[in-house]
Image (cartoon, coloured by chain):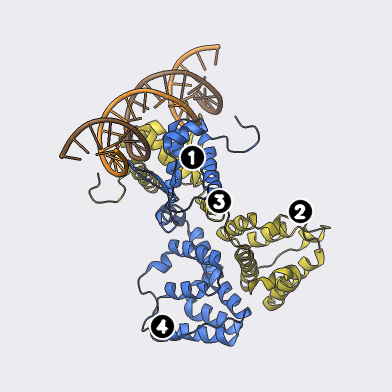
Chain colours: A yellow, B blue, C brown, D orange
Amino acid sequence: MNESGYPSKIFLEIVEKIKQLIDENHLGPGDKIPSERELSDRLKVGRSSVREALRSLELLGLIETKRGEGTYICDFRNHRLVEILGAFVLQSHQARTDLENTIQLIETGAIADLIRRGKKLPAERWEAEEAIDQRLFFDWLIKNTDNRLLLKIWRILTEYAPYYHRPERRTDKAVFLQLLSCVNDGDEAAAVSVYKNKINKCHTAVGK
Amino acid sequence: MNESGYPSKIFLEIVEKIKQLIDENHLGPGDKIPSERELSDRLKVGRSSVREALRSLELLGLIETKRGEGTYICDFRNHRLVEILGAFVLQSHQARTDLENTIQLIETGAIADLIRRGKKLPAERWEAEEAIDQRLFFDWLIKNTDNRLLLKIWRILTEYAPYYHRPERRTDKAVFLQLLSCVNDGDEAAAVSVYKNKINKCHTAVGK
DNA sequence: TCAGATTTGTCCGTATGTATA
DNA sequence: CTATACATACGGACAAATCTG
């Protein structure tokens, strides 16, 4: 059933065709793609096969289907690969220490990245707060790196980290403000030190 | 159609159910999952909906279906993901820079982690080599952190990075040995400097 | 070798909910 | 309100591949 290309499955070919269609017509987020029946007719395949292809892309967050309306292209940056993969890869047997170390690595990496790029972080938002939730804080901090992929990965990892699921687990406002101050001063060593010694002190022993 | 949970779409619920099924029965790569008709009966949904769910997972490379045999759980080394997301997501320039920055962050993070834990990296393996492949080198380096999750994430990410897919892209043995020497001396600043300036020089401008 | 059962692959028909003109 | 277009979901039918006895 396959002369040269790999995809001997109809629905994979349809995925390819849809990709081509998006390419050739320069379609972007929000644009509508042909209806299931039209694709079915144009490509000479059954509607079920078209649906299988569309569903696959929908699960990935690449398209969005609305009943009674049609199928639309999503912003590809909102793809759900990390979430899906996380759900299947991370599920159970994941070593806690690996998880915590990785989260820690991302957080320190994000801090370093912000500093090296000279990005300033306004502290106003947190000064008003009485108690600061660590997860909210780092979500905001990593969001400031403008790296959505990194943010996605961090979010899915912290989903699975029990450490981050205790309610109100950290409230010491001063430490966070100190961290921000180091970042804004461009002092990477100090920032990492504050992070290691004050914020995630309990984790530093884990590595060994 | 939706009492409490979000997924008001049947095929998404089926994806969830399949995930649960894998979890609860401790199924792993190579194991078989129930046939489409059995799932259809057990979950009280149409076979078409089951197929939509299975296809979505198949596109992701999480399962594999063989005509006349059945459906099996895959190992995640099957890279169908690369082609799919590579084609869609990486069309965006922002997505590419996010990817490169994230890989870079993990690599520098791994280096820092090794140094902080005082881990020594034997250079013998690489001294014998004439040309060093960067991907193999960092695979080995990250493996030395003993963080398998981090390694897994890094591997998936580099699968997507075109940067890592040029054959024999980097051959300067001296630079890698210099990096190892810094790591073994425990000089984090020097190690990061070597990494940034010598190995991934072309990427440092990307952040801004 | 052969026959029958099982399973996926593909398509079709039908009914229904929803949005739009 | 009606008609049309679209997605949602179900189930039937047959083909093709595989396995079993």
Looking at the rendered structure, the secondary structure element under dot 2 is loop
Residue at image position (54%, 35%) is: B9
Q: Is residue A108 above or below residue D18?
A: below
The residue that mark 3 highlights is A87
Please state which of the two labelled residues, at mark 4 or mark 1, is closer to the viewer: 4
Dots 3 and 4 on the same chain: no
Mark 1 residue element:
strand
Q: In the picture shown, does residue B133 fall above or below A135?
A: below
Chain hosting mark 1:
A
Q: Residue A30 or A171: which is nearer the viewer?
A: A171
Measured Cα–Cα span from mark 4 to mark 1: 47 Å
Chain letter of the residue carrying label 2: A
Residue B147: % across, % down:
56, 68
Q: CA distance from mark 4 to mark 2?
A: 50 Å
The answer to which of B203 and A100 lies nearer the viewer is A100
Residue A158 % position (x, y): 64, 57
Q: Residue furthest right?
A: A130
What is the chain identity of the residue bearing mark 4? B
Would residue B185 be visible to someone looking at this image? yes
Mark-to-mark CA distance, 1 and 3: 25 Å
Point out the tag, 2 or 1, that comes first from the N-terminus: 1
- Distance between the Cα atoms at labels 3 and 4? 39 Å
